Amino acid sequence: MTPTIKDIAKKADVSIATVSLVIHNNKRISEETKKKVNKAIKELNYHPSGSARGLVSGKTGNIGFILTNDHFLRSEPFYTRIFLGAEFEAREKQLYILLTTVPSEVKKGEKLPRFVLERNVDGVILVGKVPVEIVNGLKKYDLPLIFIDYEIPMEGYSAILIDNVNGGMSATQHLINAGHKKIGFIGADISHPSINDRFTGYKKALKSAGIEFNPDLCITDENYPARENGYKATKKLLKKNKDITGIFACNDAMAIGVMQCLKEKSIRIPEDIAVIGFDNVESDLFIEPPLSTMNVPKLEMGIEAVKLMSQILSKKVSSSKKILIPVELVKRQSTVAINNVSADKNK
Amino acid sequence: MTPTIKDIAKKADVSIATVSLVIHNNKRISEETKKKVNKAIKELNYHPSGSARGLVSGKTGNIGFILTNDHFLRSEPFYTRIFLGAEFEAREKQLYILLTTVPSEVKKGEKLPRFVLERNVDGVILVGKVPVEIVNGLKKYDLPLIFIDYEIPMEGYSAILIDNVNGGMSATQHLINAGHKKIGFIGADISHPSINDRFTGYKKALKSAGIEFNPDLCITDENYPARENGYKATKKLLKKNKDITGIFACNDAMAIGVMQCLKEKSIRIPEDIAVIGFDNVESDLFIEPPLSTMNVPKLEMGIEAVKLMSQILSKKVSSSKKILIPVELVKRQSTVAINNVSADKNK
DNA sequence: TAAATTAGGTTAATCGTTTAACTAAGTTTA
DNA sequence: TAAACTTAGTTAAACGATTAACCTAATTTA
């Protein structure tokens, strides 16, 4: 059967306390004894029982990871990448992640995730727009909470956030630098802080370039930033504005919809209209032309979240730290300087 | 602090053993006592400690869920849906799922998932094409194994498999029934049992319809069934065969690539060439025309796997049961009877 | 040289459950 | 009526680790 600490103690001819102290690298143990014990551990392929550990320490070694249903099933690997990063770091830190999904629309009487009720996690990571009812429910348990890519105004929680304002600025500036002046913005679910911030970045960039903000160039009334809504929004945008030369879509999914619509209307990208997205999730998706976008380091966000959680759990850091993750412009063929193609356009 | 079984015992004025017996619905306890205890449990919002339970029972209540990296990050929500189903059923059965990914190409010295090494799971579910090295490593631990949508020839494991042969037949027959005779097959990673079976179904359907199998109509040499490979394969297929009227792609991802290629060449779907896929994962993906496909009940597969695991763990069932999941034709606009469009074609 | 400190351990209590073995009272059986 | 069962619980050991408190011998300090 699986070896226990007793087997190791017997084999190394020490007490079980010594074995435990060796495992925890206690300085009271001599190098010699450490070697002896470690040898026994290796030979018997011993791993401490999580249950026994959890029982005595009051810690489970588990972290809860909450995602809404539709975020988890989104076709772009955005949240799944964040999870993957979290998983990597969890291995490093000897933690386990319990992933669960919650409905994005909470019905009354909806229960909290089981791992919270059963106290099976030491902390919880909330990813994306998690319903406020769930968050409020969680507050009652004194578990450390970390948000990723979302925020709810409250005290004493941590967050890993994307630098959306600067990202929105960079994306828009990239178009401005290429000579574009009439630049549309395609958004959805504009009350979402991340998307709202990207919109703010857009407006800031225009302002600092001395271009007047024109609400007619902005379509933000769709409810969810998905492809089909990017498609619909573009139709609306083009109906009112015939002379747009650039579009900044609030994420790549919508940008795909934008491009689909432009293609249907035989509008050339980027010759007639340049398009830039945000997230950098569609690179594998085989779009023509390849989409310029703002890269969001998704794996890193998951990694940072678990790192932070690990620190909070060992009390190394307060439980209300905010981390802002920078983004980076990725130039591809969907945006080209207006100057570079002017000959093309005028022919 | 969190209430323990002692608090319940005190409150209900019984011994802790009685509380435990009530929780496990032991018949030795009178209805009256049961009520008293359950009332106390409700009032204190008591949930048994998983660690304590795990320690004494030797069971963790966790199930490992292994997926390759690239499967998890696939843009279509195929494996994520299976996971979701598993998660649902796990809640039902009071189990937790520990999800981990492994590289699809295993380097030498690659370790097994940590939850196996540390004996933190009672059983393991392997989803999709998991490297054989990992499977072999797992065999050494006597954990029940359940494969989903993949199989490796060995003894004493269970599997939830898609009825790919019949699915392949139905898809092909659907085209045959519409009057198609020159039907292409687009596949990839043909050594994968699931894909190979779909190919077998294709051949069977042709045979039973009296249509001779023509290898020139089948492109199966790509290494991975993704969009770009569907695109490439279609180019090859069309170069050799000008008069094809239908294409069966081994999955929806490849089918998208097929359609992209046809569109580029201004070949109308379904008027010139009808296209059918497999998996039914792209319905949200906003493709024109909507893709006919074989529906694979993904949630159900996850559910079945956890149900089966739960039975195996409670020894209700042997650990080598195979479940074949039926699939169903989903007719959409990418396939239409050749007869219906013949006028169109001859004009 | 006696007291204090240090090094390197060991002993034993503890965490929260489960469950085999026991008990005491009431009910059947022969 | 005594022996044998039932019923409805209780007692106590066990699971595998952690860690405060203790111990002993060697070394340092005053």
Image (cartoon, coloured by chain):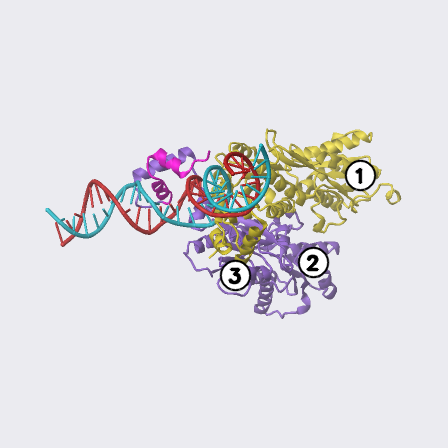
Chain colours: A purple, B yellow, C cyan, D red
Mark before the other along the chain sequence, 3 or 2:
3
Q: Give left or right: position of A280 versus B163.
A: left
Dot 3: what SS? loop
Amino acid type shown at disc 3: Lys
Secondary structure category for the residue under label 1 = helix
Three-letter amino acid code of the residue under disc 1: His
Q: Main secondary structure of the magenta part?
A: helix
Which chain is mark 1 on? B
Q: Is residue A58 visible?
A: yes
- Chain of the residue under the numbered disc 3 shown in the image: A
Q: Quadrant of residue A314?
A: bottom left
Question: Percent position (x, y) of residue A170?
Answer: 56, 61
Q: Which chain letter goes with mark 2?
A: A
**Disc 2 residue type?**
Asn
Q: Are marks 2 and 1 on the same chain?
A: no
Residue B175 position, x and y percent, is 80, 38
Kindly identify which numbered label has been placed on residue B174. Answer: 1
The numbered dot on residue A140 is 3
Q: CA distance from mark 3 to mark 2?
A: 37 Å
Residue A229: assigned label = 2
The quadrant where residue A150 appears:
bottom right
A2 part of magenta stretch = yes
Secondary element at image label 2: helix
Q: Is residue A247 left or right of residue A13?
A: right
**What is the magenta range?**
A1-24
Same chain check for tags 3 and 2: yes
